[in-house]
Amino acid sequence: MPGKVTAFGECMDSPGTLNLKYTLMKTPAYAAPSAKAPLAPFTVERREVGPRDVAIDVLFCGVCHSDIHQARDEWGGSLFPMVPGHEIVGRVSKVGVDVRRFKPGDLVGVGCMVDSCRTCPPCRKSLEQFCEKGAAYTYNGTEMDRRTRTYGGYSTAVVVTEDFVLKVPAGLDPAAAAPLLCAGITTYSPLRQWDCKKGDRVGVMGLGGLGHMAVKLAASMGAEVTVFSTSLSKKADALRMGAHNLEIVKDEGVFKKLAGRFDLLLDTVSAPHDYGRCLGLLKPLGTMAVISVPTAPVQISPFALIGGNKRLAGSLIGGIAQTQEMLDYCAERRIVSDVEVIPVQKVNEAYERMLRSDVRYRFVIDIASFKP
Ligand code: NAP
Ligand code: ZN
Ligand code: ZN
């Protein structure tokens, strides 16, 4: 008697036994074999589409600094071999029988998550990133069965359950839209949470992939945006993106001159840095949202928070509903990322360049041209 097919395409033959019954699709990819080795060609096995699955031919995949942190095991616990990539834009190639929202040929996106429990209180509020069972992350994790490894978008195809697939609205350039799936939602979400609006003064620390999206989005909401950067050479770009000014963080005088001016700070600096100095920039009751994940713990003086009832907050990506809202918002306003499109063979070089802050402003891998 055939077993019951689950959402993941496994077959439960007898209680407690999971057997993969579907044909697995061999999919060319690029993977980090270990924390110390460069990324190299690899083959992943994608499941055949189940009833609620969407198979996607990947066109473009952005390169996020989180890919580097994880491929180099800077946060600990990385799973190897690892196929990074969670800024995926592609075309639907096949859908399962119960899929209602997508059809072959649709332009779609996949971000940092590919599943969650759907039933816990955070999931019911579409805060799937806080799923009480732990969301299934697009790579360096497992599906909700906690066994089947997930592999990301540095690969020619992905198979994702319908509810975690986003519609990429017409009018958005597919390559330039790919970074919206992580850099876009990760900066849009805190701007919404802390109610960014016309006239607010918003500071963006670091003008990289996340930082440049933060500038564009905050400016589109009417904020007066100041960028805090190590590179004066990025000033013209920052102004073109809608910033009011760019200040150099090496200059201590800047922190004195601008003390107490900002309603909201979005911190996207990927390397360890001084949070206390940033908190000094806030107005009373202002919020500093920590978005970046440098590897070393930080120390701050309680006085930096108490003087002015300031908030030091965190923000992790964004839920699926808000990701779709952000994509629609960006499409209406023609907001996309500034990208440098590269072949997958250049990904190791791209990582090195990102570590030198030498990227204007997001590398995006042209996966469609990947011929293994
Ligand atoms: P990125 O493109 O490499 O940008 C990081 C920027 O930080 C650089 O462009 C640079 O800006 C600044 N920076 C780098 N090294 C620095 C140093 N030593 N001192 C001062 N500034 C430095 O990285 P990203 O993709 O935007 O990601 C940024 C961080 O956010 C990473 O830690 C990533 O893991 C994290 N992240 C978090 C979430 C979340 O959900 N919270 C989601 C995605 C990514 P300037 O050249 O302007 O100085
Ligand atoms: Zn990311
Ligand atoms: Zn949940």
Image: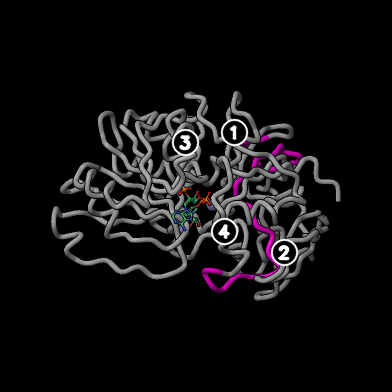
In terms of sequence position, does the residue under pointer 3 or pointer 4 come before the other? 4
Q: Real-space Cα distance between discs 3 and 2?
A: 33 Å
Instruction: Please identify, in this view, whether the residue under mark 4 or under mark 2 is nearer the observer.
Output: 2
Q: Real-space Cα distance between discs 1 and 3?
A: 10 Å
Residue labelled with disc 2: 38
Residue labelled with disc 1: 168
Q: Which residues are magenta?
A: 74-102
SS type, badge 4: strand
Q: Are marks 4 and 2 in contact (CB under 8 Å)?
A: no
Extreme right residue here?
372
SS type, badge 3: helix
Q: In the image, which disc is placed on residue 304?
A: none
- How far across and how far down the image is residue 254, in percent? 28, 46
Residue labelled with disc 4: 137
Please indicate, yes or no, whether residue 113 appears anywhere in the rendered image.
no
Asked whether, in this view, residue 81 is left or right of residue 370, the answer is: left
Classified by dominant secondary structure, the portion drawn in magenta counts as loop
